Image (spheres, rainbow, N blue to C red):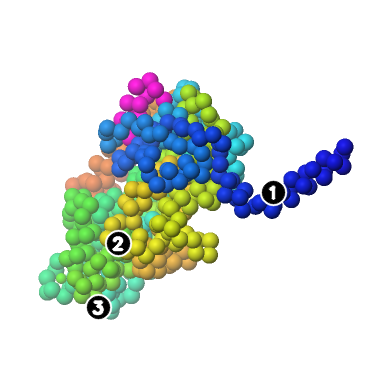
Amino acid sequence: MHKLSLHTIALSVATLCSSGLAIAQESAKVVDKPLTLTVHLHDKKFTYDSNWPVEKEAARLTGISLKDVTIGNTPDSNEAFNLMIASGNLPDIVGGKAVKRNLNRYGPEGAFIPLQDLIKEHAPNIYAQMQARPQVFNSAKAGDGNLYYVPYLTDGKYGRGYFMRTDWLDKLGLKVPQNIDELYTVLTAFRNEDPNGNGKKDEIPAFFRNWQEVLRLVTFWDGRTSGSDTYHDFHVKDGKIKHGYAGAGYKLGMKNIAKWYKEGLIDPEVFTRGSRAREFLLANDLGGFTHDWFASTASYNDSLKDKVKGFKLEAIIPPASISGVRMEEHRRIPIKPEGWGISYSNKHPIESIKYMDFWWSEEGRRLANFGIEGKQYNLVDGKAIFTKEFLENARPVNSQLTDIGAQVRRGFWQDYNYEIQWTNKFALEGIKLYDQGDYLVDQFLGVAFNEKEQATSDKYWSGIQTYMLEKQQSWVLATSDVDADWDNYLVQLDKLGFNKVLTAMQSAYDRQYGK
Ligand code: CA
């Protein structure tokens, strides 16, 4: 009897092997009989579309189709979510932009089911990533310790970097600045020595498309502005939650930013020029130095090459701070507050989690990132390579992809190779430069508050932040003086509840990430 069983098993394995191809093709199947699940997936740019080619291909491979029931008649994902809750009908799957905040609120109340055990048992691809990156997945958990959504994980490390008109450096006989003193010298020369050659003192040495980036200069004086890809966020140092705007380096940094601003090294319109600042100041041969996204900033080398003679805007590694630290404070966050979860009324939670897991398999991940083989991309040596027709038509790659249902914020894992294929050589060279050093700092991925901590944060934080930003701007514009204000500023922060918020953040942090 025993021998017979072994023999039978051996036979089955042999049969499986000989039909390996068929098995591989069938491996994504979740259900034998087609199953339709309802979905609410809202993003301000789109709602879920059952006719997306990517969605149809997933349905063909898994046997599960999603029927869109998104309440989407608003650009605001949070409002759409609230309307869905108010309707009293929870679709089987709920996803999109406002997921983390809402599922982590309504999950503990019973509207959504905890996923960690389902993932462990039925979703090997997601589970492998959970095992590989526990801190990242920890950050997605709710205050009760459960995971209520499969997150959207981004890929790629670098977001913003420092860029400089290196043709201006050449023209003035200057070298790439290696520290804060040399940066000051270079910006002063941009101001005074007419690098654009029009005989006017019209150069804007340092400019920023997002005004918040001017604050980033405090890192040159060992200050901090944020620990995440959200401006003005907290950061963590040696296990302790801190806020940059209450630190000593920040005080010294603000003093120097005010000095630079007064000397005309920083765009006088930095707080008001708006999002077209980069486009305008580069196209008019006026801007010299900035801190912005690699790919889009480097792209001006292509778009302006015939318009601005000699134009060369290259990434430079972060000049060293007063204590010799080269820091790039911004990076891509590894996890977004987006993804999708399973509602309590879903009758097929196991099939649902298996379907979600499909998007993390090699095949599903390729589908979610690149679209359809033979249409948007071809497989070359096992890698998805976008076709020439796809990359070289006039439409932006990102919108072409979302139009077919790829790069849509379902719970999936991005593949940076999708982006690298249309990133120009100046950006790639810049990224390579940053990759040779160790400039990035650890990220603060956020905390899940319990009710009491949430109440503390809700009560105090927005007033504190408003006060911080008001003072900050008054210091840069020199309507008040940071040295004179500082002691009173710290007293005011405490009165506004700053230390209470820090304590709440710390207890949530310790619970979530361990002491
Ligand atoms: Ca000039």
Q: Badge 3: few (under 14), some or many (20 or more) residues near its Cα, within 10 Å?
A: few
Residue type, mark 1 in image: Leu
Residue type, mark 3 in image: Lys
Does 505 sit above or below residue 389? Answer: above
**Which numbered mark, 3 or 1, is in the foreground of this view?**
1
487 and 59: which one is in front? 59
Q: Badge 1: few (under 14), some or many (20 or more) residues near its Cα, within 10 Å?
A: few
Q: Magenta span: helix, strand or loop, mainly? A: helix
Q: Mark on residue 171?
A: 3
Residues marked 3 and 1 touching at CB (< 8 Å) = no
Sequence order check, earlier mark of 3 and 2: 3
Residue depicted at 22% across the width and 60% down the height? 279
Residue depicted at 50% across the width and 48% down the height? 364
Please tell me whether residue 252 belongs to the stretch shown in magenta.
no
Position in image of residue 170 (x %, y %): 28, 77
Q: Badge 2: few (under 14), some or many (20 or more) residues near its Cα, within 10 Å?
A: few
Apparent side of residue 313 relative to residue 204 in the rendered image (left or right): right
Does 470 sit above or below residue 287? Answer: above
Please tell me whether residue 83 belongs to the stretch shown in magenta.
yes
Residue type, mark 2 in image: Asn
Position in image of residue 188 (x %, y %): 24, 68
Q: Mark on residue 393?
A: 2
Apparent side of residue 301 relative to residue 54 in the rendered image (left or right): left
Q: Give the residues in magenta.
A: 77-90
Give the quadrant of ligand 1.
bottom left
Residue depicted at 18% across the width and 47% down the height? 479
Q: Mark on residue 16?
A: 1
Mark 2: which secondary structure?
A: loop
Q: Mark on residue 501?
A: none
Position in image of residue 53 (x %, y %): 40, 47
